[in-house]
Image (spheres, helix red, strand yellow):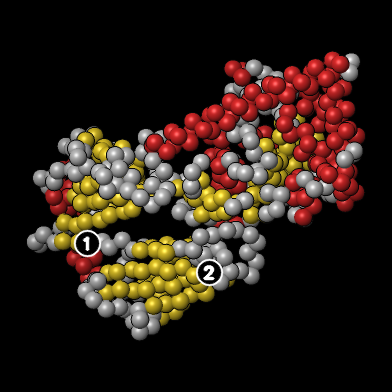
């Protein structure tokens, strides 16, 4: 068979910016248009959406404009099936009630026939695999354009376009595209228009990697005969912007650690002047806070626990130095709700029991204390002890270790709630991959920003995020490319991480 030319048209998507809240009874609209790339549209085509959440199928037929309209639950992921379209596609419904998304697919009327004609036999696949063994492990691309290979039929000409957070071309961005099966790598950088041209061997799944973000995106290039082109457009903050943000965050943490040291010094001087031990001083400070009941009732911990009717809770609470006001809110809530709470359990952590920073090992930092509900005096005694044992140290905390060990120590529970210090990064976030219990994250101190670590914990565990005003429960259903707005700031999932959109 002679050489064929196959062109894949990248679909264009317009998606409404999402802000999550309770989604019961929430329905939004998905509009899809089917374009004939030889002119006109496809009418009378059966189109289905199948929910990845509950498997429910929605069916309709394209109208004279080539359009279909679905009214579906908000913020769900769907598999898309079009009668005369052979590619596998997925899409998201908007998360705001009544909001509308619009997507277009352009393809040829003989798409199915072409796919059949272009399919590669098993013998041809084996022959190509053997030929590709001679490729170097790493191919370096100069001036953003890879030279055309000699065996052109075995490759897909592929264009990657990278844009920054302002949707402008990201120029001179180093990029590595790696094949998962053959372990062949293609290394280069984007041109002034944010584009790089590659020839990628067919029959592999490729990951796009940046210097500080590995496995950012993946795409499969199938075994086909003939020649073909494909393209993808990615949004990425860029190495320069990443380093700028990292510098700002490092300076913030350094300033926070300096503040904690000064706060500890002032407290110890006060204890000395009052002729109190540090433990006695902590008890007095805690008592002073607890006496301010009306003020504590306006705090985030009290409000979140009051308005969310979680039953049989396991509460995991950070009790490092800055968390004393929030601990007081928890104590007051407990005092007023003890009688009606069933199977309530607590885990408190202090990031290592005053260990030196060099002694703190990921997964073995310790300073984690578990207790079943025994009454207010018992809770207050434990909270004071945990704070006394761990007052001081670096800014990042061992949240994941506390979650993992706390769940192991606890008896069966229904809801897992973590009261976290939004100013303190999660030092052991790498342990998240080993944890899958849904976590309701209560963000203390999240008035002006949210640390991405806590969004990631809620998202990956299919939990929720809670601020003083909002209960963001749909974060569990978010997908790559979707956005969430918290306290007026937008965070977008990019490369499996939450990225603040706009200047950090």
Q: Secondary structure at mark 2?
A: loop
What residue is at 24 percent from the left and 65 percent from the top?
115
Residue hosting label 2? 99
Residue hosting label 1? 7
Against 16, is 357 above or below? Answer: above
Please state which of residues 119 and 401 is positioned toward the viewer in this rendering: 401
**Crowd band around label 2 with a 10 angstrom C-alpha radius: few (<14), some (14–19), many (20+):** some
Residue 161 in the image, given as x and y percentages of width and height? 30, 50
Please state which of residues 203 and 485 is positioned toward the viewer in this rendering: 485
**Crowd band around label 1 with a 10 angstrom C-alpha radius: few (<14), some (14–19), many (20+):** some
For the N terminus, give its image quadrant: bottom left
Please state which of residues 237 and 87 is positioned toward the viewer in this rendering: 237
Q: Residue furthest left?
A: 2
Q: Earlier in the sequence, mark 2 or mark 1?
A: 1
What residue is at 74 percent from the left and 46 percent from the top?
300
Against 420, is 279 above or below? Answer: above
Residue 67 in the image, given as x and y percentages of width and height? 39, 77
Q: Secondary structure at mark 1?
A: strand
């Amino acid at each position: 068979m002679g050489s064929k030319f196959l062109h894949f048209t990248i679909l264009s998507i317009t998606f409404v910016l999402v802000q999550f809240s309770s989604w019961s009874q929430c329905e939004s609209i998905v509009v899809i248009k089917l374009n004939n790339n030889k002119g006109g549209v496809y009418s009378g085509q059966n189109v289905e959406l199948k929910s990845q959440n509950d498997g429910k199928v929605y069916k309709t037929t394209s109208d004279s404009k080539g359009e279909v309209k679905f009214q579906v639950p908000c913020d769900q992921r769907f598999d898309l099936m079009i009668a005369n379209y052979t590619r596998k596609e997925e899409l998201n419904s908007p998360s705001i009630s009544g909001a509308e998304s619009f997507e277009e697919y352009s393809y040829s009327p003989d798409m199915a026939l072409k796919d059949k004609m272009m399919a590669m036999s098993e013998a041809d696949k084996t022959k190509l695999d053997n030929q590709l063994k001679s490729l170097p492990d790493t191919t370096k691309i100069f001036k953003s354009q890879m030279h055309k290979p000699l065996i052109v039929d075995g490759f897909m000409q592929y264009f990657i376009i990278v844009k920054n957070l302002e949707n402008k071309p990201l120029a001179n961005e180093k990029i590595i595209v790696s094949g998962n099966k053959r372990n062949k790598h293609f290394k280069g950088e984007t041109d002034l228009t944010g584009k790089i041209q590659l020839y990628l061997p067919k029959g592999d799944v490729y990951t796009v990697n940046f210097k500080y973000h590995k496995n950012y995106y993946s795409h499969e290039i199938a075994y086909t005969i003939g020649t073909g082109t494909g393209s993808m457009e990615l949004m990425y903050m860029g190495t320069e912007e990443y380093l700028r943000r990292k510098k700002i965050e490092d300076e913030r943490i350094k300033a926070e650690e300096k503040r904690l040291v000064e706060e500890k010094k002032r407290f110890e001087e006060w204890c000395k002047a009052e002729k109190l031990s540090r433990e006695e001083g902590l008890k007095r400070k805690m008592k002073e806070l607890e006496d301010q009941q009306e003020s504590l009732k306006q705090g985030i911990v009290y409000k979140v626990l009051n308005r969310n009717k979680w039953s049989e809770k396991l509460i995991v609470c950070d009790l490092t130095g800055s968390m004393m006001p929030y601990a007081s809110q928890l104590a007051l809530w407990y005092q007023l709700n003890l009688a009606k709470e069933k199977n309530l359990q607590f885990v408190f952590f202090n990031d290592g029991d005053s260990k030196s920073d060099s002694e703190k090992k990921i997964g073995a930092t310790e300073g984690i204390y578990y207790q079943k509900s025994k009454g207010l005096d018992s809770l207050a005694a434990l909270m004071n002890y945990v704070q006394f044992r761990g007052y001081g140290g670096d800014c990042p905390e061992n949240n994941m270790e506390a979650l993992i060990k706390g769940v192991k120590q606890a008896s069966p529970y229904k809801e897992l709630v973590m009261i976290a210090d939004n100013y303190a990064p999660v030092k052991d976030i790498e342990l998240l991959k080993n944890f899958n219990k849904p976590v309701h994250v209560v963000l203390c101190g999240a008035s002006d920003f949210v640390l991405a670590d806590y969004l990631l914990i809620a998202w990956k565990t299919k939990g929720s995020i809670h601020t003083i005003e909002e209960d963001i429960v749909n974060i569990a259903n978010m997908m790559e490319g979707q956005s969430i707005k918290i306290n007026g700031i937008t965070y977008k999932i990019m490369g499996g991480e939450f990225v603040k959109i706009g200047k950090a």
